[in-house]
Amino acid sequence: MCYSFFLHLLNLIISDSVEELLDSIKKYSESLFEQIRSFRQYLHANPELSFQEKQTSLFIAKTLRDNNIPVFEGIGGTGVIGIIEGQINGKTIGIRAELDALPIVENTSLDFLSKNDGVMHACGHDIHMASLLGTAIIVNKLKSSLTGKIVLVFEPGEEQIPGGAKQIIDSNIFQQNIPDIMLTFHVLPELISGKAGFREGQYMASGDEVYIIVKGKGGHAALPKTTVNPIVIASNLILNLKEFIDKETPPAIPSILSFGKFQANGATNIIPNDVHIEGTFRTMDEDWRHKAHHLIEEISKKTCIDLGGDCEIEIRKGYPSIYNNPELTRKAKILAEQYLNPSNVIDLERRMTTDDFAYFGQTIPSVFFRMGVGFENSCNFQLHSSTFIANEEVLKYSSGLMAWISFNLPNKID
């Protein structure tokens, strides 16, 4: 009887402690909103391309130092790692944000639009960085309640293969502080700000770049019998490859082969010697990915030779597919429901986009989730668009939610 009463009392104390922590995180998140928004607006106005994020990394490092968080710079070139240690030993969670912007000319009316011509934060990395800085400040203020350690990863070059994740993973400081869990979020314009989305298991695709040079025999357009037209060959090749994907892909494995560039330097009266075509192959199964690469090469060679030409083909292997640890993702979703309310947390569909966060997930149980940046009753422009605008209301929730997950998720693994 006494033992049962003691357990009940202990549970009440723990429950009160958890509620107190949640309340503290929400209060800090609210009070820090304007500061976090100022981080975002500075970063948006000063974007830098992949592996060139020198001023961005200096800003990140200074902000962490200003908040008495130990900082390690120059990771993978421009990467930054911050470390917050709790008062009690425990699990380590790593949280990632990306530093780089895209080579896009911004076409918005924002007061803080890009000052760097031809460079824009069109994928929300400014939101990610500002959010993680906010999380760092919140956690550091409450670190007396932190069990274990948090590794803050600001990764360079996510937008450019081979990406910066591998360089972060291989760095001495990361290896000395290997997380038990990795966490990240990415903005989603289709989802209204204030909402979050999760998916257990396979979530995003691998992505490989396909480069083919179709070789023919150029000549006068009026004398087709004396030429081998590479435009005709390349056109047939694209159709054959599409048929291959449609027929040969296993039914349960999403796969897409898309060509976005078809370049032939001929003229109205000139058949060119060659055609350059470029595209991407995306899928969600590593065994099929490997097999498909060989089949794409075989079909390309056979098609070109059968039509009297030849080809050179290169498949540049990109990022692997993203797999969300089911148990951790399920628990992270419950924590998000506690923080945002269940009505604001949804289940996500699989997506064929890519992210090099997948490399972390190959060796560390990981969770990649989404946060909405869409506007209600408004047209929301897509990521990688010159007109993309993120709803800054997300910053009222993103930092606090990651802090809440960081305090609690490591305690939910064995």
Image (tube, grey):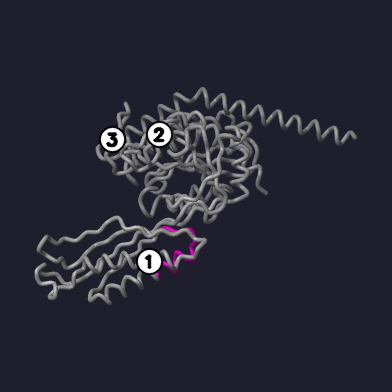
Which residue is more in the foreground, 331 or 50? 331
Mark 1 Cα-neighbour bin, 10 Å: few <14, some 14–19, many ≥20: few
Amino acid type, residue under disc 3 in the picture:
Asn
How many numbered marks have been drawn onto this rendered protein structure?
3
Magenta-drawn stretch contains 290: yes
The alpha-carbon separation of the residues under discs 3 and 2 comes to 13 Å
Give the spatial CA distance, label 2 vs label 1: 38 Å
Kindly identify which residue carries mark 2. Answer: 390
Q: SS class of the residue under badge 2?
A: loop
Front-most of 311 and 166? 311
Magenta span includes 393? no
Image quarter of residue 259: bottom left
Determine contact: label 2, label 1, CB under 8 Å: no
Tell me the amino acid under the disc marked 1.
Glu
Of callouts 3 and 2, the N-terminal one: 3
Name the magenta segment's main secondary structure. helix
Q: Nearer the viewer, mark 3 or mark 1?
A: 1
To which residue does mark 1 refer?
Answer: 243
The magenta-colored residue range is 282-294
The vertical placement of 402 against 262, above or below, is above
Q: Quadrant of the N terminus?
A: top right
Answer few, some or many: residues within 10 Å of disc 3's Cα (few below 14, many 20 plus, some between 14 and 19): some
The disc placed on residue 107 is 3
